[in-house]
């Protein structure tokens, strides 16, 4: 009798332990879907306004940062005031919203832009930080698989696409602020944890002009 009771207890405890990661995964997806639904409430109005502006707009000269078609889902995502862009890395099959700020709240559902660094596509060093995987998603878990020459695509709120090329990477201490250093070129720095959070993995990218 005691053995049967213990067996039931162990089985129940095992099922409970297995359900915790599933709960967080479900919660993360639910939160993302809620955000997308919220963004989509504004997208129809945005499209109407864009349509009116398009009728008045003359053909613009093609520039390095091109205006590209944005899907309905991406347009909805970008319509949020909290979301400032989208990051896509084909080599990692990665796509996440970019949010302003890199506190735990922001990093729970996206990749964070460190506020005192250059804006997306601007001259200077734009620094983006992401978790090395979490209960809510993979984020920058596989960042270490990037190679020299890989492309990082950033879409800003206006639909402009900025292409960056990976040129180097390094591991630095957790308080090394040199990763935020600004220069005269358009640069992108990707930042995540390394060595169980005791260090930082940094990827340096340069803007691909004319792409």
Image (cartoon, rainbow, N blue to C red):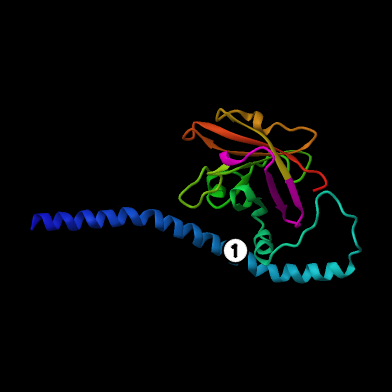
**Where does label 1 land, which residue?**
36
Q: Is residue 99 visible?
A: no
Q: Secondary structure at mark 1?
A: helix
Residue 33 point in image, percent of width and height: 55, 63
In this orientation, which residue lies closer to the viewer: 146 or 2? 146
Point 58% across, 62% down: residue: 35
Q: Which residues are magenta?
A: 144-163
Left/right of residue 149 with respect to residue 67 in the rendered view: left
Left/right of residue 201 with respect to residue 53 in the rendered view: left
Q: Is residue 171 magenta?
A: no
Point 70% across, 31% down: residue: 181
Left/right of residue 173 with respect to residue 189 in the rendered view: left
Q: Is residue 160 magenta?
A: yes
Crowding around mark 1 (Cα neighbors within 10 Å: few <14, some 14 to 19, many 20+) is some
Left/right of residue 132 with respect to residue 205 in the rendered view: left
Residue 139 point in image, percent of width and height: 55, 48
Q: Is residue 98 visible?
A: yes
In this orientation, which residue lies closer to the viewer: 13 or 150? 150
């Amino acid at each position: 009798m005691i053995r049967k009771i213990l067996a039931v207890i162990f089985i129940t405890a095992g099922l409970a332990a297995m359900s915790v990661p599933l709960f967080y995964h479900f919660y993360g997806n639910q939160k993302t879907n809620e955000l997308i639904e919220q963004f989509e409430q504004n997208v129809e109005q945005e499209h109407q306004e864009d349509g009116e502006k398009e009728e008045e707009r003359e053909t613009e000269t093609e520039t390095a940062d091109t205006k590209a078609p944005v899907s309905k889902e991406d347009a909805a995502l970008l319509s949020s005031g909290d979301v400032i862009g989208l990051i896509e890395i084909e080599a990692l099959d990665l796509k996440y919203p970019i949010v302003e700020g890199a506190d735990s709240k922001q990093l729970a559902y996206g990749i964070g832009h460190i506020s005192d660094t250059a804006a997306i596509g601007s001259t200077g060093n734009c620094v983006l930080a992401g978790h090395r995987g979490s209960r809510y998603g993979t984020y920058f878990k596989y960042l270490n698989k990037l190679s020299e020459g890989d492309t990082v695509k950033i879409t800003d709120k206006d639909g402009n696409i900025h292409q960056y090329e990976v040129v180097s990477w390094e591991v630095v201490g957790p308080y090394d602020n040199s990763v935020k250093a600004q220069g005269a070129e358009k640069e992108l720095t990707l930042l995540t944890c390394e060595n169980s959070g005791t260090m930082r993995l940094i990827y340096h990218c340069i803007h691909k002009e004319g792409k």
